[in-house]
Amino acid sequence: MPAKTFRLTDTLSGQVKPLATLEPDHLRFYSCGPTVYSYAHIGNFRSFLTADLVVRTARAIGWRVTWVSNITDVGHLTDDDVADAQGEDKMERALRSKEGEQFHNVWELSEYYTEAYREDWRNLNMVEPEIRPKATQHVREQIVAVEELIKNGHAYETPTGVYFSIESFPDYGKLSGNTRDNLRKAVREAVVVDENKRESSDFALWKKDDKHLMQWFSPYGWGFPGWHIECTVMAMKYLGETLDLHSGGEDNRFPHHECEIAQSESLTGKPFSNHWLHTRFLLVDGEKMSKSKGNFYTVRDLLAKGADPLAVRLALMSTHFTKELNFTEQGLNDATGNVERLRRADHAVAAALEAKRDGEDVLGTLLEDLGDQALDAMCNDLNTSVALAKALEGARAITREAEGMSMATAESSLRFLDRINDLLGIVRSQYGDAKAECAPPAVDASVIEAKIAERAEAKRAKEFARADAIRQELDSMGIELRDTPQGTVWVAKSAGL
Ligand SMILES: Nc1ncnc2c1ncn2[C@@H]1O[C@H](COP(=O)(O)OP(=O)(O)OP(=O)(O)O)[C@@H](O)[C@H]1O
Ligand SMILES: [Zn+2]
């Protein structure tokens, strides 16, 4: 296979550029994980899913991937949109909330939500990262990094903590545009929280606090680490001083990633990450979905309402990661229809593999081309819409051939569906999905596809009464039609939402 170029939007250069690996064919990738003070919502998962798609695409072009995705379980404060975040630790505040009453302590709360997050992760059929480090298990390394930054003149101690001096890092602002000058003009940043700080935007590496529920002893007394130093240390510990790629949601660009760059590059003198990826927000009614705003759905909310987990996954990846995505019921319904369509093709192939009929492979070339085109689309800045269109085109071809399908055609169809599933994860779940494993509907797919084609023909000829009659006939067979931007799909009513 000739080497493929994987092009990806890079926030640092503002360009779509080839993702390059320092070691040949080995991607070293860090993605910011959740703060485990509550259930992650599907907005959080939109960001994690972009990372999952990067990993799947990298593997599909033959790269080895070391993917590190952390768990933030201390140090993420509530007012986190300014360089030096203030407020309360999100974990502590959660323990005091109504939801927190069920836990004996903040450690138990953290364990509970970490487990819930991993369960949701599996339900969305996401690839497991190689390493999931927890911030609380790397405090010693964080203290060593803070010591080093003080020693090399990038950080200083005050009565409230240890702060990174942004004046010591002239490149501060290169990722987000929030340079020292720009920050000084911003009203919020001008609020003085510790008059011993050299500059109001100098951010905390360590907070002194002997009342904090999670605290460690350090050269500066009892306290806890800042959120930014946690990710710097965990990324470099497992991936080395320069990463190939670092990702997060768009709000991580500033201050989190800007501060990570400042600390890391001041420690090593080398670029921290050669490529930066940020997923735009998932919106509800035009607003950012967020835990703090309370306008969110969790994966478990949607599954409890009967949503198909793979359809939730597909709905979250239906819009390019550089564009905001409005989460709607219509979007979820379209995704449900499309997942059903892929699953039906998969069932048809399973049946044909059982039947072992003689005959030629009539789909091999077409499906190989479509598989290549889906991969090309993903290598072209994760173009999920085109990749999905190719997947559906293949599924349609397979379903059309379902009746009497030869063993040879079934084998090439299976290869295609496996390939699509490895790339997009929307055909069947690697963790075993109850819905995906349920028996195929007791209807003949090729008959239904033929009726759908007849209805489309009737609509084209403006014979709307005939088109309606076909819809009704299918309805009485327990088949519901859904018109989606990719064409009409059908759902056995017992299996849909
Ligand atoms: N609506 C959203 N759409 C896409 N990504 C999001 C959204 N909200 C948060 N993220 C991303 O999810 C990841 C985990 O976020 P984290 O658990 O720290 O969330 P949070 O900031 O506490 O939550 P919230 O922003 O909902 O209050 C981060 O990379 C963040 O950028
Ligand atoms: Zn992070």
Image (cartoon, rainbow, N blue to C red):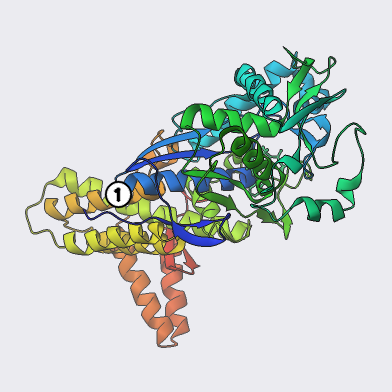
Residue that extends furthest to the left in the rendered view of this protein:
358
Where is residue 99? Give x, y as percent.
77, 27
Q: Position of residue 88 (x, y in %)?
A: 83, 30
Which residue: 35% across, 57% down? Answer: 5
Q: Quick one: 63 or 22, which is closer to the camera? A: 22
Q: Mark 1 points at which residue?
A: 419
Q: In this view, does 219 lie to the left or right of 460?
A: right
x and y, in percent, of residue 309 in the image: 50, 43
Taking 367 as reference, is 258 above or below it?
above
Residue type at tag 1:
Arg
Q: Nearer the viewer, residue 50 or 87?
A: 87
Ligand 1 placement by image quarter: top right
| Residue 214 visible in the current orientation | yes
Quadrant housing residue 434:
top left
How many neighbours does mark 1 have within 10 angstroms: few (below 14), some (14-19), or many (20 or more)? many
Q: State whether residue 76 is above or below residue 147.
A: below
Q: Position of residue 259 (x, y in %)?
A: 68, 40
Which residue is rendered at x = 17% and y = 43% of the image? 354
The residue positioned 64% from the left and 29% from the top of the image is 230
Given residues 48 and 489, the one toward you in this image is: 48
User: As rendered, which of 446 and 310 lies closer to the eye?
Assistant: 310
Give the quarter of the image for residue 96. top right
